[in-house]
Image (cartoon, rainbow, N blue to C red):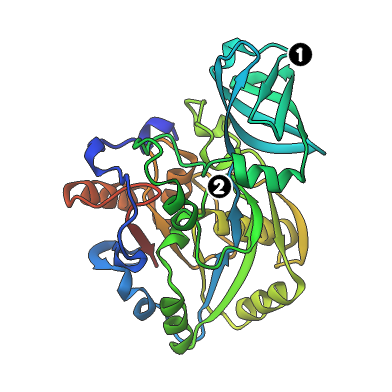
Amino acid sequence: MLVSEFDYQLPEELIAQQPLAERQASRMLTVDRGRGFFRDSEFRDFPAQLRKGDVLVLNNTKVFPARLNGQLETGAAIELFLIEETSEMHWTTLARPGRRLKPGKHIHFGDQLSAEVLEKLADGRVLVKFTARLPFDDVLDRAGQTPLPPYIRRGETSIDADRERYQTVYAAERGAIAAPTAGLHFTPEILENIREHGVKILEITLHIGYGTFEPVRADDLADHRVSTERFEISEPVAAELNAAAADRRRIVAVGTTTTRALETSASRHGRFASERSLADLTILPGYKFKAVGALLTNFHLPKSSLLVLVSTFGGHELIMDAYRHAVASAYRFYSYGDCMFIS
């Protein structure tokens, strides 16, 4: 299929710029794959959509402040967005403006942190080496900013609030450069309600990296591959997942990142394995899902690998119709937006 088949028109005013006052107050479009229909609902109804015996799987990755604003020796402003640590203190980054950066240039982020440009890479990426006077994570927590997506355009008015709201309530394992946004709707009360419905809640980790939001540059999806991302499934969680699969109990994934990790493991081993590895699976039309039976997800960008994954799971025609309905019904889109539950 062509990536152009995953396009839709979205008015800019539907891109959520702020989180709602209450996490659980989002709207939810409920999609029934079997009967081929969808209906409007609210996320508060999500626990009632689950069945006794279901297994709900969360991605407990934690976002770190991956955006840095610094200056060259000339005083010119430079923004670095940290993508991946390739070795100790060496990071692949996105730089803006990148044209000012040449190997040997130094960028300063206050008096505690600096970076030397080592190499300019493809697609606007830059390899740098950091020098810090204190432990790097501590300095980053002070100097860095929440890595909000570029479609959130409201300046720096809510930095403190974003540090809390652009994070799930169950975030535990530091390492993501973007939030697993389907999880942003949950509260401790909602999670407890889900347990009371007889649903087992499990946690895995996939550290969201550049692959999650990297643009699809190929016209034909057969030529596209999503970059690898680090994930971990513990031995007790793998055992619980295998037991659920053996009993034909439904595995419900919260988010496309959770889906990618689960499907990577199931595709690689024929079952769920305890592992710390790289998710290298690219889910395209024609892929047969081996693990996930239902999916909670936010609304994704046109022509993105995430929309392709969701459409592959839910069915291309049904999901694109659902997206057009969501636009017509003024749902809120993207990271701080509403959600969709596909069963």
Q: Nearer the viewer, residue 50 or 318?
A: 50
Q: Nearer the viewer, residue 288 or 98?
A: 98
Query: Where is residue 63 shown, x and y percent of the image?
Result: 58, 51
Q: Is residue 258 left or right of residue 181?
A: right
**For the residue marked with disc 2, what is the amino acid?**
Ile
Give the total of numbered labels: 2
Identify the element where label 2 is drawn: loop
- Contact (CB < 8 A) between labels 1 and 2? no
Counting other residues with Cα less than 10 Å from the Cα at mark 2, is it few (<14), some (14-19), or many (20 or more)?
many
Query: Where is residue 125 shown, x and y percent of the image?
Result: 63, 24
Quadrant in the rendering for residue 212: top right
Query: Where is residue 162 shown, x and y percent of the image?
Result: 44, 51
Picture disc at residue 235: none
Quadrant in the rendering for residue 38: bottom left
Q: Quadrant of the N terminus?
A: top left
Picture disc at residue 283: 2
Which residue sits at x=22%, y=46%? Answer: 327
Which residue sits at x=35%, y=58%? Answer: 339
Which residue sits at x=42%, y=83%? Answer: 193
Q: Is residue 282 above or below residue 23?
A: above
Identify the element where label 1 is drawn: loop
Quadrant in the rendering for residue 242: bottom right
Q: Is residue 24 above or below residue 85?
A: below
Query: Which residue reaches farthest front?
Result: 111
Does residue 209 appear in the picture of this structure?
A: no
Q: CA distance from mark 1 to mark 2?
A: 40 Å
Query: Where is residue 55 shown, x and y percent of the image?
Result: 54, 77
In terms of sequence position, does the residue under pointer 1 or pointer 2 come before the other? 1
**For the residue marked with disc 1, what is the amino acid?**
Gly
Picture disc at residue 104: 1
Which residue sits at x=69%, y=48%? Answer: 138
Does residue 306 appear in the picture of this structure?
A: yes
